[in-house]
Image: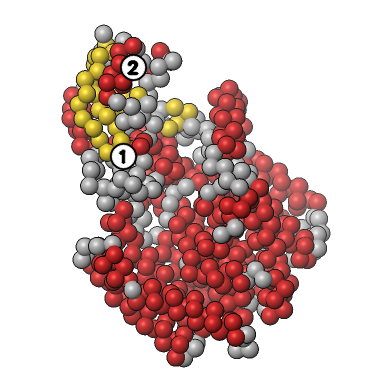
Amino acid sequence: MKNNYNLLLFLCFSMFLLHLNYLFVDIMEARNFVTAREMVDDGNWLFTTMNGEPRYQKPPLPTWLSAGMGAIFGTNSVWALRFPAALACVGLILVFYRFVKKETQNINLALTIGLILTTTYLVLFVGKRATWDIFCYSFTLMGVYFFYRTFQSEKNNFLQFTLAGIFLGLSILSKGPTGFYVIAAPFFLAYWIAYGFPKIKWAGWIWMGILTAIVGFSWYGYVFLFDKETLIHTLEVESTARTNREVKPFSRYFSFPVQMGVWAVFALISLAFPYVKRKVELPKSYSFFFWWTLICFVLLSLIPSKKERYLFPLMIPLAATTGFYLYYLMQNQDWKKWEKILVKFSFGLIGLIAISVPVILFAIFKVEWGIYAILFSVSGILVGIYLMREVFKNFNLRNAFLGTVVFVALAMFFGIPVIDGLFNSNPHHHSILTKKEEIETSGLKLYGFDAYSPEIMFKYGNTIPEIYPDKPETYPKESDFFLISSDNEPIESIINQLKNLGFTAKFIEKFDDNEEKPGTKNHVDRKRMFLFKVNKN
């Protein structure tokens, strides 16, 4: 058991805690990082701000953790700011491993499921980014795990209830009640269906509820007492945005098994409930995780706003159902003919992709020859050959499974720096940072005018106060200052708007802080800015 746990621990740390300085900071991270910087620089730990303005849209726990690392290693250190989120993802995986081990009493099955969850595409994608989501999901799962353990005891175990209450409270302090809706509720309903309603231990349940409320709503309560109007207005705007932003139909999530990455085919088959239930060693446990997956999918689909990363909570129980099915295949040889074809196709395709890494990198994407690209290519060829041998010659599914895990791990270790190079492909990249020293040396302050860009706010490293035309109190008191504005409008139009506000503006330069080249998904308007020097009339 100890060796299994150490293997999973090593894999998690090597995949999630390395290369945190690669991949550019996205908008979700930038918001968190700017708020973290202002916590450290301005002391705004409770009345959180972003670019000097109140930022109450999300609770502050994830930002506190990033700010703590920033205070030690510097608020411009991307790896330091991302470290807490990566650690939270590792914690989620390790807790789920223990959860499955407790549920099934099968260490090897728990390890199989833990390895699947660790190498799932969406888990890797979210776990390498410092968003609020991963903290919320991790703390919720920890709370659910300790709550689940109370079901198996006849007496009130107040330590378990206390831990459950604290972690569930921390999940609220990370992203409100989201974790309850997408993890806790599906877990509880699935347990009810599979095992019956758990015996209520009133004292423990009430104590857990009180702790959850105290921890979870402590920040909300404090801000409500001292900045009520701003908090209420912010929550109203955020609530409206959640129902109107990224609205997609119910069918949007039907392709959810694809988010499992290399395990997608097995994940889909694992949801064939009547068939798989008859085959697996622990049908009750499989049923529990199946209903958890199904209920989570339904609840997620009911939310109007839909994005791929919102499917992360679904990957947790889906990794379990996938693990049950793969473990059955590894333990038995009485497969159907279509299952043999399925195994050969799935692992053979992964082996083919691994062997093709050099072609994909150097022939298709024209990657420059470098140490990481070469090591990724060589390791891909070796693992691909190994997979092909184990699938088509030895037909050893266990070795093919482990070979796939190794391939994903090597892809993360050698591939992330290569992917980072591909992302930084904008030939017109010209950052505002090239003018920062000149601006600061001049003694003039930099302002924004229609310049909302959390990524640029983070890169610049200082607050860039925004000028709002309908709010004279936001107009600069200085007679001379620099100003950036989005390039969504012609230069002359911006100069005329500023003129109407009583300012004379002179265009200086255009900047493009997009890392990716034009025409790609992540090349966005908000990263392109005009710089002006402005005087009061």
Looking at the rendered structure, the secondary structure element under dot 2 is: helix
Say which amino acid is labelled 2.
Gln
Q: Tag 2 or tag 1, which sits nearer the N-term?
A: 1
| 412 shown above or below 453 | below
What is the image's colouring? secondary structure
User: Position of 103 compared to 313: left or right?
Assistant: right
Q: Quadrant of the C terminus?
A: top left
Residue drawn 71% across the image and 66% down it: 288
Instruction: Name the amino acid, label 1.
Output: Lys
At x 54%, y 82%, the residue is 341
Q: Which residue is mark 2?
A: 497
Q: Nearer the viewer, residue 76 or 427?
A: 427
Choose top left, top right, bottom left or bottom right for residue 527. top left
Report crowding for label 1: few under 14, some 14 to 19, many 20 or more residues within 10 A (C-alpha): some
Q: Secondary structure at mark 1?
A: helix
CB atoms of marks 1 and 2 within 8 Å: no
Residue 232 place in picture, x, y as percent:
60, 27
The residue carrying mark 1 is 459
Quarter of the image that includes the N terminus: bottom right
State the separation of the CA atoms marked 1 and 2: 27 Å
- Would residue 502 be seen by someone viewing this image from the given angle? yes
What is the quadrant of residue 218 in the picture?
top right
